[in-house]
Image: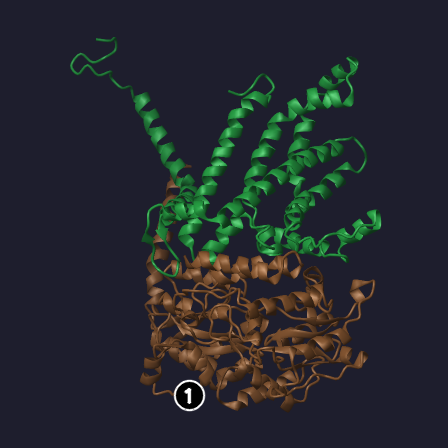
Chain colours: A green, B brown
Amino acid sequence: MRVGMSVETGVRPVSRKRVRAGLQRRLEARWFLLFISPWLVGFAVLTVYPMIASAYYSLTNYSVLSPPTFIGFQNYTFLFHSPLFWTSVRVTVIYAIATVVIQLVLGLLVAMLLNLRIPGMKVLRTLYYIPNVLPMAATSMLWMFLFVPRTGVLDAALHQLFGINGPQWLSDPRWALSGLIIMSVWSIGSSMLIFLAGLQSIPDELYEAADIDGARLFTKLRHITLPMLSPQILLNLILGLIGAFQTFVQAYMMTDGGPDYATYLYSLSIYQNAFQSFHMGMASAEAWIMFLVILALTAAIFKTSARWVYYGGGTES
Amino acid sequence: MKKWMTRASHGMAASLSIALLSAPMVHASSTITITWLLPTDTEVDAYAHTVATQYEKENPGIKIDVITPGSTAYNEKLLTMVAAGQTPDIFTDWANTGVYTIISHHLAQDLNPFFKADKISSSFIPATYKKEYTEDNHLYGLPWLSNPTFIAYNETLFNKYHVPLPTTSWTDKSWTLNKLLADAKKLTHLTSNPKTSDWGVDLTPGSIGSLGWLWGVDPLNNKGGPTYTAAYRGGALTQTYATQPKEVEAMQWLADLSLKDHVMPDQGTLTAMSTTGNAFFSGHIAISEVAGWVWRQAAQFQPKFKWGIVPIPYGPGGADTAQREDNAFYLSSTSKHADAAFRFMVFATTGWGAQQLVKVGKIDPPNTNPKYLEEWVAGVDKIAGFSMKNSVFEQVFEGGVNRDFPDPTNLLNDSSDFGDPFTQLMSPVWIGRESAKQGLQAVQSAWQQVLQ
């Protein structure tokens, strides 16, 4: 028998202090649950339930207008055999790669410029971020006018500067996706802001030491800036990929997925199946495929990040 | 502190309980609520609220809940309301939720028993619409909006280039597509500045290539034009005919207007000219295909030039049929107040309600009583730039109503499976990357996949 236990029961006698502490903890737990309950209810009703429901609908033939009927994995089988599904995948992958690269490279370059200590920099930073707070619907309308052949700003600039006639940006299947990709330059503000915060946290001593060693600009960029910014690059990469895979408004408003399915982004395909073709079951299956793909990509990026992301004292385990 | 928090939480719980308990007490009164879903613009919104308010005043105990999600969001709103088990008592067909999509999913109920029970004759519904909304002797829709297709002309440009105005007679067989093209060539004057160029014509292929009707073909049947075949009655399609030679000819003729004849702006230029919602109102297009809503657009954009409408020209097939966009009100099959909702539907579309459609909604209600058309024509006369005599306009308009056939996408069950591939796969044809034959072959192939 261990010291301090009751002879009759073999159970350690509980002190009043400990009982009070236990009661206090339970009371705190109750208050915690009371105050967190609005969020818990919201999370359960608005996130968990729709996810479970969509998982079920993905296994049904459901038009929304009529009750669902269970069909097993037929929606998934149909999608994997549908040329249009693979078109939307191809278009989305091209769009995602291009926009993520643009956002990372341009975002970093602009952040480096905006990190210079010159007068009026705060105004410039604000100006660069403004497009990110504008509604995408309004931005899409604006870009539609920029892309107008011949009389639009873009074509007029091409003609004035290089003497070339621009293409039919949004009407030509060869150029429409490029148009949407070019438009993504507009929203580099978020990645720029994250990079800027990262740049400002890099200690000046590192650059001073490099200067003493005679390091040039590119060497400092390669051996100091990029390694020190690797956590921000990781964050921007993941956020950019998720955002690119979920892009919808531009394709919906500017091209409606056309011409000739050239801008048939995956999210648009989900929307059209759900609300225009009345194939909510199939749209749910598409949504789940996208969820799993994004999950897998994010996991893969995190797994490789141990090799290239530098967290100050060492790599994060 | 603890006591205060306990009291506060008890107080909140008590308030919540009272609120929850009192909710049924409010509804325990004799007021019934009828939900009415319709897609709106400013005028339709004003019409809906005007008739709802008047009906509530005349019928104490009935509340009309007008839900107006806007034209582009209508479909989503209807679908989500149906999914939530809250199908509105009265709703309309719109976008891809067409007549037979509604009927085949059993969303609406037959109106004939209600007409019979209330001893009201349905004879105020013109025969052409009755045919459109009747299936197996069940009348499902009460028409409230109809938009035939016409050719609009810019009289100012015709005068500028000394081209005689087209005929206003539907029986004048000299008004053909060839004549239209000849006029368009005379009216096209392109300059180095695209903003000052004048274009001869702007036509569209129709929602699934219905321009082919003028050539005597229909892409979804082989009966020599649009007829109420099984497909247009909500039945299952078994075959499509997108690659018929005359359909190919029709689509190539349309593409050539821009690519070969250079009398029609390309797609990009048309987008730039459509900042007013309709390129015709840019004032730089002489002849344009327009639908019945052109007067509503004109009232909004106040064109600075003189304009009017003429019939659809005869095509090589000897036909002058275009598509007509019709919409009806439906009574939900799950309505808990079907009798009251039906009476309100009739109120909103006949008599005083029909007058409000004309006066407030700026709509010509489909009705056998000619007085509504006359009142509407009198209103159209006041629209900026509209230069036609009332009597001439009336006969052109009526000809369109009588000759046109309903838009196939409003008839086909799940029409976007056919409409979307057509729009997407024909786009390379309009910019000359593919021939009409290649484009239609792609469309035919996509449609066959849908059938499978």
**Location of residue A99 in the rendering, given as x and y in whole percent from the top left corner:** 63, 40
Residue A208 visible in the displayed image: yes
Horizontal placement of B380 versus A90: left or right? right
Q: Residue furthest left?
A: A8
Depth check: B215 or A125 in front?
B215
Horizontal placement of B23 versus B317: left or right? left
Depth check: A142 or B67 in front?
A142
Image quadrant occupied by the N terminus of chain A: top left
Q: Residue at x 72, y 39 (%)?
A: A125
**Location of residue B187 in the rendering, given as x and y in whole percent from the top left corner:** 76, 75
Up the image or down, B402 lies above or below B41; here it is below
Residue B22 occupies quadrant: bottom left
Residue B156 occupies quadrant: bottom right
Horizontal placement of B293 versus A216: left or right? left
Q: Residue at x 80, y 78 (%)?
A: B161
Label 1 sits on a secondary structure element that is loop
Residue B61 visible in the displayed image: no
Q: Residue furthest front?
A: B245
Residue A258 occupies quadrant: bottom right
Up the image or down, A261 lies above or below B175; here it is above
Q: Which residue is denoted by mark 1 in the rendering?
A: B123
Please name the amino acid that badge 1 sits on.
Answer: Ser
Numbered disc 1: what chain? Answer: B
**Location of residue B57 in the rendering, given as x and y in whole percent from the top left corner:** 45, 80
**Location of residue B231 in the rendering, given as x and y in whole percent from the top left corner:** 42, 69
Depth check: B319 or A279 in front?
B319
CA neighbours of label 1 inside 10 A, class few (<14), some (14 to 19), many (20+): few
